[in-house]
Amino acid sequence: DAKTTQPTSMDCAEGRAANLPCNHSTISGNEYVYWYRQIHSQGPQYIIHGLKNNETNEMASLIITEDRKSSTLILPHATLRDTAVYYCIVGGSNTGNQFYFGTGTSLTVIP
Amino acid sequence: KAGVTQTPRYLIKTRGQQVTLSCSPISGHRSVSWYQQTPGQGLQFLFEYFSETQRNKGNFPGRFSGRQFSNSRSEMNVSTLELGDSALYLCASSNGQTLRAGNTIYFGEGSWLTVV
């Protein structure tokens, strides 16, 4: 699976949009971009995933560039409960269902 | 619909002992995978099972093993425990056969293992 690069940490003011970038320049055509987050001591929580088109659900929006080499997760109105480590993962090059996690971005939402 | 359930949530073992962790996937999911999370190594893939067969395995020693039952429930076992095995062990289940179809993976809350 293609590797991803994310900033180590980010801050965001409460109520503002949080934009978390991810680079995946070696992504191949059949690989999806997934976003998960992990609040301390809990299991990773699925947020959203996509292949080519932008995606939106009740939690977030995923913007994938046309060349698919990078993406941005947008939390439209960040709250204190959004403070977590956010993982961008590329998956689907191999058979099976497994992820290879990077180090993620530690997002802190500031009151 | 119940999520991925892992038991026990917390346990303490002594070096040299063995431990078995259990995972019940989301109803209808046939794929179960296991991950180890430590502060130093982050989240690492252990192995994945689909329909009782191990399909993929991460880079872990043979002391780490697992199995999946006909009802899709899974167990992982670690023998001859070492201090470095102290970690959060996460189980995840998926509703499809492969990520190539854009399946989603759902994680449990994990089992915290402390080896003393």
Image (cartoon, rainbow, N blue to C red):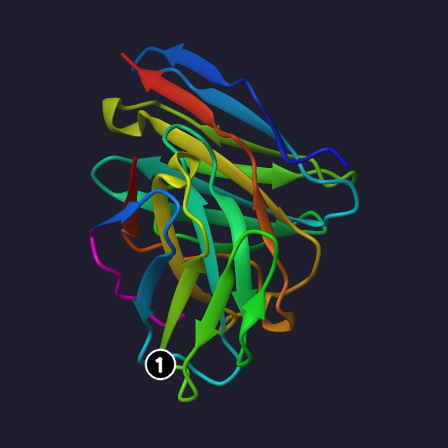
Question: Is the C terminus of chain B in the top left, top right, bottom left or bottom right quadrant?
Answer: top left
In the rendered structure, does residue B29 fall within the stretch colored magenta? no
Residue drawn at x 43%, y 60% is A74
Lateral position of residue B23 relative to residue A15, left or right: right
Q: Nearer the viewer, residue A70 or A75?
A: A75
Q: Position of residue A65 (x, y in %)?
A: 41, 82
Lateral position of residue B11 relative to residue B116, left or right: right
In the rendered image, the residue lying farthest to the bottom is A67
Q: For the residue carrying disc 1, how many other residues have a C-alpha within 10 Å: few (<14), some (14-19), or many (20+)?
A: some
Evaluate whether residue A95 shows in this view. no
Q: Position of residue B25 (x, y in %)?
A: 68, 38
Instruction: Work out whether B40 lies above or below A96.
Output: above
Q: Which residues are magenta?
A: A1-9
The amino acid at mark 1 is Lys
Residue drawn at x 45%, y 31% is A42
Q: Which type of secondary structure does the marked residue at label 1 adopt?
A: loop
Instruction: Work out whether A59 lies above or below A110.
Output: below
How many numbered circles are shown? 1
Label 1 sits on residue:
A69
Q: Main secondary structure of the magenta part?
A: loop
Lateral position of residue B19 relative to residue A87, left or right: right
Residue drawn at x 30%, y 52% is A104
Q: Nearer the viewer, residue A74 or B107?
A: A74
Q: Position of residue A25 (x, y in %)?
A: 31, 80
Evaluate whether residue A10 shows in this view. yes
